[in-house]
Image (cartoon, coloured by chain):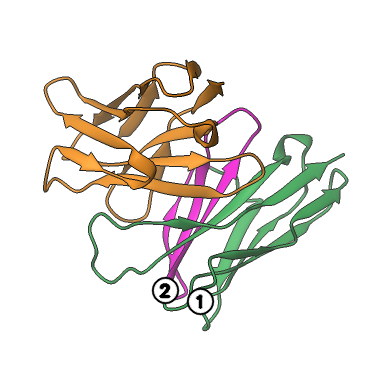
Chain colours: A green, B orange
Amino acid sequence: DAGVTQSPTHLIKTRGQQVTLRCSPISGHKSVSWYQQVLGQGPQFIFQYYEKEERGRGNFPDRFSARQFPNYSSELNVNALLLGDSALYLCASSLSSGEYPETQYFGPGTRLLVL
Amino acid sequence: AQSVTQLDSHVSVSEGTPVLLRCNYSSSYSPSLFWYVQHPNKGLQLLLKYTSAATLVKGINGFEAEFKKSETSFHLTKPSAHMSDAAEYFCVVSDGYSTLTFGKGTMLLVSP
């Protein structure tokens, strides 16, 4: 079975640019979450989407936005990139079928470097 | 508010010896707790999760964790370390649905 997939795997941008990261959930999973993992730290929650609606948002600036498509895939957009946005961006999917606690399954991540 | 504290940033063991990775949690309600493992250049893999059905939780690859409410702890153990266990381990608390809060991680080093 295919797991969570993310693209691209690596990305280099310069300050001020915009970036779009993509995520495809496990087949049948309806919820997608995004996390930022800065080097040497644990992942931090950015967003969760369920059925195309935002279900949760972490403490990130408005430069970060996301959306979920009818096929449950998702995009994370970051505008006006700063050096501090350099990180591994992780996508996770979950069934959202009433399971409690919900288990999230992670993709391999997109490593973003901002120069 | 919820949080986890992983008490050791690095733990070094010899192959074949027991592993103990310590985690304390803080939660204003009955917590949902997980342990994830991250191998170099790989995504996060779920080791186990606490669902309140049993305080001793068994996971994959011989790992287990014990939920102790009185100590607000959820330590991860394994009787005998293997070289392939070398990785970073994250203790995680959840609100049950959308938000996972990760600890800072414990790097497990296994020497032959």
Name the residue that disc number 1 marks.
A72
Q: Is B6 rendered above or below residue B62? A: above
Specify whether A66 is left or right of A14: left
Residue sitting at the far bottom? A70
Foreground: B36 or A60?
B36
Kind of residue at badge 1: Tyr
Q: Position of residue A29 (x, y in %)?
A: 42, 73
Q: Quadrant of residue A56?
A: bottom left
Q: Are marks 1 and 2 in contact (CB under 8 Å)?
A: yes
Q: Secondary structure at mark 2?
A: loop
Name the residue that disc number 2 marks.
A30
Specify whether A79 is left or right of B13: right
- Local packing at callout 2 (Cα closer than 10 Å; few below 14, some 14-19, many 20+) is many
Specify whether B109 is left or right of B100: right
Foreground: B19 or B103?
B19
Q: In percent of the image, x 35 and y 21: which residue is there?
A: B20
The boundaries of the magenta stretch are A30-59
